[in-house]
Amino acid sequence: MSWIQDNKGPAAVLGLTGAGVIGLGVMLFNAWSGASAAQEEFDMVNVSLSRLKSTPLAPTNDNLAKKQQIVQAYETAVGKLSLVLYKLQPEDKPTSNTEFQAKLKSRIAEIKKLGGGKLPAEFNLAFDQYTSELPKSDQVAAELSSYLDAVEEIVKLVLKSGAQSLIMLERSPLTAEKGESEKPRVSSSKSKGKGAIAKPAAAQTVNITERKQVRLAVRADQAAIQTLLSALASPSEMPFFTVAKLVRIENESQIGPARLPQGGATSGATEPAVGNESAPPAATSGEAEAKPGLAPAAPDSQVVLGREYLRAFLEIDLVKFLNPQTAAAAQR
């Protein structure tokens, strides 16, 4: 008789176990095959979707209408935002050229009185030429007046921050201040050759902002620079829209402290001379402090970082928001 006939119970258990293992293996193989097929299908769909996203839109009327609708909605949202920002900024007030010059001189005197010795010797709020000459017109004077207000606010923030000194202050000129030679030249419309192909005219963009740049250099510690940058971004302290475009900071002392000599940690007390028993004993620390004229004890440590002053160079953009309705009408 065989072993299976003699051991029917264990043989039945082993048979069922083997059948279960084979069935589980078949199920795992089918699941792995299905997962591989699903992954391949997902990759194919993902590649097709990426290709569709990068493909240009078909030039159909339906696509053109949808794109124009999206662009119009975007322009409307930008126009509303720019109109709100335009109303939040300080308003330009009409100013004559003589009024501007008088205003400039009075503001220079006020700032010099407020700054004390923290300002350069020749300091005219970066409007040096208008202390002796008038602007070209009243319209230019009105633009310069608001420009002067913004520069003055920046200088006041520098003084309030606790900076040690204002080293340099410069500003970019207005478009109306520039000479005729700096205006862009208009290219000729004549064709250069018979085979020349005229390029399509570029679409006109509506400018809703006007940027002016103020450059300054200050000498201050780290806390003062942080206070200045925070104040420039605070609408409660800076009424004009400013953007710190560039901030470059360097340590004023480029060389580290000198190494202490050996024995620098010893006290400044004098020792009796060798062979001179009549010399007075060494003075204690209390006596050394009490007696005037004695040299103080040599320091046993030096501060390496944290007390040096910094030189900071800042390029600040003054952003002026234009009336979107006026700007759009001027571009037409």
Image (tube, rainbow, N blue to C red):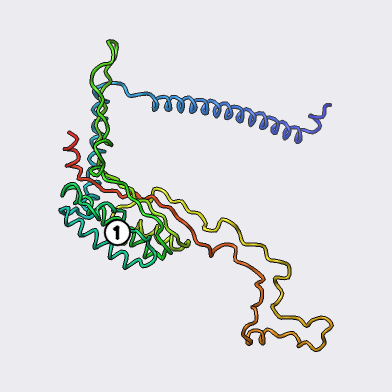
Q: State the residue position of label 1.
A: 152
Please indicate whether residue 55 sits to the left or right of residue 130 in the image: right
Mark 1: amino acid: Glu
Q: Secondary structure at mark 1?
A: helix
Q: Is residue 67 above or below residue 213?
A: above
Q: Nearer the viewer, residue 119 or 202?
A: 119
Q: How many marks?
A: 1
Residue 88 visible? The answer is no
Quadrant of the frame with the C terminus: top left
Q: Residues within 10 Å of mark 1 (few under 14, many from 20)?
A: some
- When the figure is inspected, residue 284 is found, relative to residue 58, above or below; the finding is below
Q: Quadrant of residue 263?
A: bottom right
Answer with left or right where residue 148 lies relative to residue 23: left
* Residue plotted at (26% across, 48% down): 320
Image location (x, y in percent) of residue 45: 45, 26
Q: Residue at x 19, y 46 (%)?
A: 136
Examine the rendered structure and indicate whether residue 30 appears above or below residue 146. above
Residue at (27, 27) in percent of width and height: 202
The image quarter containing residue 3 is top right
Q: Is residue 63 left or right of residue 163?
A: left
Residue 85 at what x, y percent from top left? 25, 50
Residue 192: horizontal and vertical position, in percent? Answer: 28, 15
Q: Position of residue 141 (x, y in %)?
A: 19, 51
**Nearer to me, 89 or 264:** 264
Q: Is residue 7 above or below residue 209?
A: above
Location of the N terminus (image quadrant): top right
